[in-house]
Amino acid sequence: MQHYLQLMQRDMELRGFTASTKDYYPRHVSRFLKHWGRSPEEANEKDLCTFLYHLLTVKKLNPATVNHCNSALRFFYEVTLNRTLNLRALPRFNEGYKIPEILTPDEVMQIINTCSNLKHKCILITLYGSGIRLAELTNLKISDVDSKSMRLLIRQGKCKKDRYALLSKVNLDILREYYKIYHPKDWLFEGRTKGSRYTNRSVQLLINKYSKKAGISKHVTVHTFRHCFATHMLQNGIDVLQVKQLLGHTSITSTMRYLHLSDSQFHKITAPIDVLMGGRTDG
């Protein structure tokens, strides 16, 4: 089994896959191979489909994870094993679109104010102040902070694209305070060992810790701060194209979703029934 995973790793390296994809794809394929228990060469589309159904119904994995496993298996069989698959026999689950929970500005401040650890507070403010992704945060280096232009250099973000993110004055001030105390060497946010990078998992844990401590009943994740950044920017009247650029979205469609979350848009709309009846509700 290890031989197949090594071949797959080579194929992903040659195609310049992101670090997260190179981490998750082998996990999914390894899970299938352990479940299958035989040579992967013997499996067909029906066997793969049965496994995906098992993940969905028995393991109760969410549809997004099952779809990701689907992609991993397709790559493994079509690229690494050089097999032509009937993709119609491996349907993807229609995930639909669920509106994510958004924190109000006051709720964001509750979480930040609950945090007494300077490094943790700095991480929270950087996430909300710039709207960057989790991996983009943990990959930040000291040299990526451009205080003259008030921006953060995001190196090789999603789809391996460089871009600039917003660096607010509040964010810069607390970063300076943080630097004077912690003196990070290379990575902006270091782990417990000097010179090591702060892990994604550690960021997720601190978000969970401080949101609970603040008494926030909503489901808060690292990505929630990105959602809040975009939504609150639109509520503050920032143009959607500017928000798209700051978020690093390839398509404007991704950014337009945040318009559905911005309640400022609803306050500007007059319902036809109000126009017809002049706001009267009396009989």
Image (cartoon, helix red, strand yellow):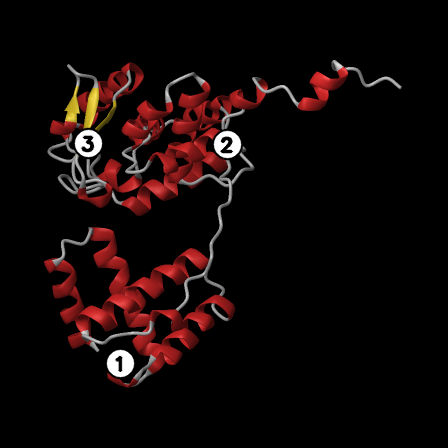
Q: Give percent across and percent down for residue 13.
A: 12, 58
Instruction: Decide if residue 72 is in sight here.
Output: yes
Looking at the rendered structure, the secondary structure element under dot 1 is: helix
User: Can you tell which mark lies on residue 11?
Assistant: none
Looking at the rendered structure, the secondary structure element under dot 2 is: helix
**Going 50% across and 26% down the picture, which residue do you hit?**
262
Structural crowding at the residue carrying mark 3, measured as other residues with C-alpha within 10 Å and reported as few (<14), some (14–19) or many (≥20): some
Q: Is 10 situated above or below 108?
A: below
- Mark 3 → mark 1, Cα distance in angstroms: 40 Å
Side of 128 where 9 appears, left or right: left
Tag 2 residue: 260
Q: Are marks 2 and 1 in contact (CB under 8 Å)?
A: no
- Going from the N terminus, do you reach mark 2 or mark 3 first? 3
Q: Are marks 3 and 1 in contact (CB under 8 Å)?
A: no
Q: Quadrant of residue 139?
A: top left
- Going from the N terminus, do you reach mark 2 or mark 1 first? 1
For marks 2 and 3, give the one nearer the viewer: 2
Amino acid bearing label 2: His
Instruction: Decide if residue 115 is in sight here.
Output: no
Q: Give the quarter of the figure containing the C terminus.
A: top right
For marks 2 and 1, give the one nearer the viewer: 2
Amino acid bearing label 1: Pro
Amino acid bearing label 3: Arg
Tag 1 residue: 40
Tag 3 residue: 163
